[in-house]
């Protein structure tokens, strides 16, 4: 059996309490004490992965180094721990059932009747143990998606129950995140929702070891004692999780509540090393004490749900702290942006970012934003589709290809400056078939990109089907848009920059996915710096 220790994080009462942030914060505290920690997320939906989900449905799709399309919580894990995740860190019910059914077709179960228990639960347990059995981690934190009591999450809770029993005392514990709501009319916090949530967990055979209570107001000692007594946990195992200004304050709040010490005691692990959070504290100080501010417009088509651009907004926070300024991001819906209103919508911003996306909706608004940034010499940053849009706009308005477009949006254009990648032409399925994961890129010396990175060889994560069409490379470059980043193996254009512009950079990859608290992404730092210069 695995030598790693396991922490399961469950949620009750309501969704969106922040299991991922609590898991990441606890992991950060344990990591700061010298332990090797990783976090995995089990999602109870039947999609094999979030890759085919609409961003309005599930927020952004986070891509790992090895090309897995995963839940956005993995972004939080990486941003907090500064350690890459992988395919093994995100598992869905769809993937579990797919594996079990494939095994049944191969005869792996020797003619047995395939059932939720034991076959589905055994496959879940196998995946829960994979990271721990690798020998790379001392502690594996497993976040169970959904809310206790949901039909969808029952197999995960049962698997967790079995695994806790199999691993034995002090090798696995349960942290249950719940809500202690404040009733304004009564003027008091209410513990009953938490009691009912724990009762639901107990009915499934699982006793939580630690309660983390989300609350708008402080939990009094008497209220904590009541929760401990009624929920059958020790007094020091009721942890207050107050609402905070930023998620990056949560590790310090959990440190103050001694969550890490309680966890280590229950896992019978030494806690002699005090947490080394100096770098984190310095980041928080710069975040909370900016010396200036800068306004950035994010032009996209999923702006009603900010989680669709979660990694981008967090990358701006990291870059802002690095530049000691507050980055104020305003979301502009590209569908409602036109040549007639672009001046009123975008005037006053010191930088314009055109966001990633798929499909034709809102494309003309993005083209309008790119043109406005290029002509008015406003620092511009285009990511994935944003880079492709910048190429289309340049080809139309500078090169003179009036019908220039992407073959994704216009199959009959005579100037497909953006075209479907060769290896994509035979693809029939949409899920997991894009160009995914980390690829190398070589930069041109002296370019904005090379200056930002401080080197000419980099690796970045991708998620796309279409690419810059090299048939138009010479025409575009001779007109003043230079390819400053290229994949050394395929010749794929990864980065474009416009000459005689203070900062105009479009990238085919997703730099936001690699920005962390400890390592803000250099392109975001460069963009924010250019915006500060423009403002000045």
Image: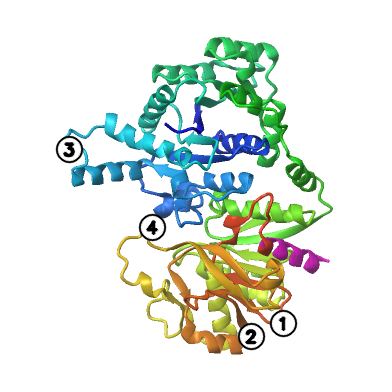
- Residue 209 showing in the rendered view: yes
* Marked residue nearer the N-terminal end (4 or 2): 4
Nearer the observer: mark 4 or 2; the answer is: 4
Residue position marked by numbered label 1 in the rendering: 500
Q: Are marks 2 and 1 in contact (CB under 8 Å)?
A: yes
- Cα gap from disc 1 to disc 3, whole angstroms: 69 Å
Q: Residues within 10 Å of mark 3 (few under 14, many from 20)?
A: few
Q: Secondary structure at mark 1?
A: loop
User: Does the magenta run of residues contain 530?
Assistant: yes
Q: Is residue 176 above or below residue 360?
A: above
> For the magenta stretch, what is the residue range?
524-536
* Marked residue nearer the N-terminal end (1 or 3): 3
Q: Is residue 38 above or below residue 236?
A: below
Q: Position of residue 358 (x, y in %)?
A: 46, 63
Residue position marked by numbered label 3 in the rendering: 110
* Marked residue nearer the N-terminal end (3 or 2): 3
Q: Are marks 1 and 3 in contact (CB under 8 Å)?
A: no
Q: Residue at x 64, y 67 (%)?
A: 381
Assign the C terminus to one quadrant of the image: bottom right
- Cα gap from disc 2 to disc 1, whole angstroms: 8 Å
Nearer the observer: mark 3 or 4; the answer is: 3
Residue position marked by numbered label 2 in the rendering: 480
- Cα gap from disc 3 to disc 4, whole angstroms: 31 Å
Q: Position of residue 425 (x, y in %)?
A: 34, 72
Task: Decide if residue 326 is on the left or right side of residue 180.
Answer: right
Q: Nearer the viewer, residue 87 or 349?
A: 87
């Amino acid at each position: 059996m695995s030598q790693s220790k396991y922490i399961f994080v469950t949620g009750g009462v309501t969704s969106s309490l922040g299991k991922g942030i609590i898991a990441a914060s606890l992991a950060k505290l344990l990591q700061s004490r010298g332990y090797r920690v990783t976090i995995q997320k089990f999602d109870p939906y039947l999609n094999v992965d979030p890759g085919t989900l609409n961003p309005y449905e599930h927020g952004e799709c986070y891509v790992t180094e090895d090309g897995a399309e995963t839940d956005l919580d993995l972004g939080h894990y990486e941003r907090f721990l500064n350690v890459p995740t992988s395919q093994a860190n995100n598992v869905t019910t769809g993937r579990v059932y797919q594996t079990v059914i494939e095994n049944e077709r191969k005869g792996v179960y020797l003619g047995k009747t395939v059932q939720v228990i034991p076959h589905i639960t055994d496959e879940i347990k196998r995946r829960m143990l994979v990271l721990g059995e690798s020998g790379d981690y001392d502690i594996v934190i497993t976040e169970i998606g959904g809310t206790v009591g949901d039909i969808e999450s029952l197999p995960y809770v049962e698997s967790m129950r079995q695994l806790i029993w199999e691993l034995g005392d002090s090798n696995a514990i349960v942290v249950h995140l719940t809500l202690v709501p404040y009733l304004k009319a009564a003027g008091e916090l209410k513990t009953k929702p938490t009691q009912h949530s724990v009762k639901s967990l107990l009915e499934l055979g699982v006793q939580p070891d630690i309660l983390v209570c989300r609350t708008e107001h402080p939990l009094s000692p008497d209220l904590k004692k009541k929760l401990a007594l009624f929920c059958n946990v020790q007094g020091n195992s009721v942890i207050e999780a107050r609402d905070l200004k930023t998620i990056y304050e949560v590790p310090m709040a959990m440190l103050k509540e001694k969550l890490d010490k309680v966890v280590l005691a229950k896992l019978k692990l030494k806690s002699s090393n005090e947490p080394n959070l100096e770098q984190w504290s310095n980041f928080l100080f710069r975040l909370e004490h900016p010396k200036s501010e800068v306004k950035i417009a994010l032009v996209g088509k999923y702006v009603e749900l900010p989680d669709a651009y979660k990694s981008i907004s967090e990358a701006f926070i990291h870059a802002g702290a690095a530049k000691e300024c507050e980055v104020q991001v305003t979301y502009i819906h590209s569908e409602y942006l036109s040549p007639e209103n672009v001046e009123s919508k975008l005037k006053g911003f010191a930088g314009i970012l055109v966001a990633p996306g798929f499909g034709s909706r809102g494309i003309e608004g993005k083209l309008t934003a790119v043109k406005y940034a290029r002509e008015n010499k406003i620092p511009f940053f285009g990511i994935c589709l944003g880079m492709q849009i910048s190429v289309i706009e340049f080809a139309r308005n500078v090169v003179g290809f009036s019908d220039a477009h992407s073959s994704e949006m216009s199959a009959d254009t005579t100037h497909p400056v953006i075209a479907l990648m060769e290896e994509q032409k035979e693809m029939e399925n949409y899920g997991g078939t894009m160009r995914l994961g980390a690829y190398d890129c070589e930069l041109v010396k002296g370019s904005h990109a090379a200056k930002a990175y401080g080197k000419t060889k980099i690796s970045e994560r991708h998620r796309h089907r279409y690419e810059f069409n090299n048939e138009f490379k010479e025409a575009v470059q001779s007109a003043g848009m230079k390819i400053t980043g290229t994949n050394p193996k395929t010749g794929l254009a990864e980065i474009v920059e416009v000459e005689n512009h203070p900062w105009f950079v479009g990238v085919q990859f997703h730099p936001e996915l690699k920005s962390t608290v400890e390592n803000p992404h250099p392109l975001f730092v460069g963009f924010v710096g250019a915006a500060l210069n423009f403002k000045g």
